Each structure stands twice: as structure tokens, then as C-alpha cells.
Amino acid sequence: MRFKHIFIGLLLCSILFSAPAVQAGDPLMKLGRGVANIVFSPFELLIQPYDMAHEEGNIAGLTAGVFYGVFFTVSRIVVGAADVVTFLIPLPGCADNKYDTGWGYGPMAFRDNPWVFDVEHNWGNFFYDTEDMVSDRY
């Protein structure tokens, strides 16, 4: 009886830990992205009005930008919670490459910027040291 429980446990562990290798994704990256989306989501209240003010003007930044900030804050919390809850499970439409449509551990939403902070919103070189970046794009 005990051998049966050990065998089933080992079988389940081998299935769970072999799934990431088959999917070529990273469930820990999905977990980290989910936690980061939850923790850093309030910064959308600053990022969205800032972006809107630079693209459309200050009045739009103070009005529509605030609404966009609230919407993106709530969206990041929901998507981050879903990432944390399902980090071991590859999902359909979440391929690692944003141009693929298969199953994977990629972002469910925010395909162009799955992390809250990118190089464009790197105030004071806090998150990325722009002097050490190799790419000419930034």
C-alpha cells in the first residue's frame, strides 16, 4: 500500500516537473511576472497620466490619463493574480513568443509590455542602468 502511494507521488512529480521542458516556457518567470504585476500595479496611476500628457497634452493627462491609470491598475492586479494562481499550468493563447498562438507560460495580457516598468519608464536609472545597455534602440 505504501509503495503505491510513493509510486503515484513520484509519477505526479515527474509529470509536473517535465511539463515546463516540453512547453519550453518558464513557470517561475510567470510567477515572478504575476507578483510584479500585483506589487507594482499602483505605479500605473503615475505612468498612464505621464504617457497621456506627453502624447495628448496636459489636460488629457490629468483627466483621461487618471482613468487609464485606474483601469490599468485594476487590470494588472487581476492579470497578476491569475498568473500567480496558474503559474504551473500552461494556458492557451499565452505562448512565450507574442506572435505565436499556442499554449505556454507567456503573458495573458499586456503582450507589448508584460512588466510594469520598461526602459522608457526608467526614471533616474532606478530599474535599468541605461549606460550599461548594449542595444542602440534604447
Image (cartoon, rainbow, N blue to C red):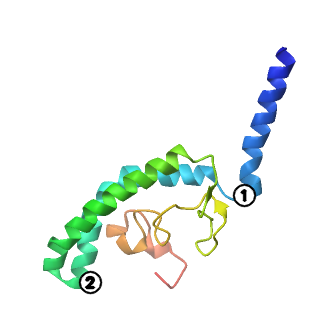
Q: Residues within 10 Å of mark 1 (few under 14, many from 20)?
A: some
Q: Nearer the viewer, residue 99 or 29?
A: 99
Q: Are marks 2 and 1 in contact (CB under 8 Å)?
A: no
Q: What residue is pinned by disc 2?
A: 55
Report the residue at 64% width, 53% height from top. Answer: 90
Give the quarter of the figure containing the N terminus.
top right
Q: Residue at x 15, y 72 (%)?
A: 62
| Percent coordinates x, y for residue 20 in the rendering | 71, 52
Which residue appears farthest toward the top when viewing the image?
1
**Visible in this render: residue 126?**
yes
Residue 43 location (% of width, % of height): 30, 59
Which of the 4 quarters of the picture holds residue 72? bottom left
Disc nearest the viewer among 2 and 1: 1
In the displayed structure image, the side of residue 32 where residue 43 appears, left or right? left
Q: Is residue 126 left or right of residue 114?
A: left
Residue 29 image point, x, y percent: 58, 54
Q: Earlier in the sequence, mark 2 or mark 1?
A: 1
The residue at the point 13 percent across, 78 percent down is 59
Q: Which residue appears farthest toward the front when viewing the image?
A: 92
Instruction: State the image quarter where residue 119 is shown.
Output: bottom left
Q: Which residue is mark 1?
A: 23
User: Mark 1: which amino acid?
Assistant: Gln
Q: Which SS class for mark 1?
A: helix
State the separation of the CA atoms marked 2 and 1.
39 Å
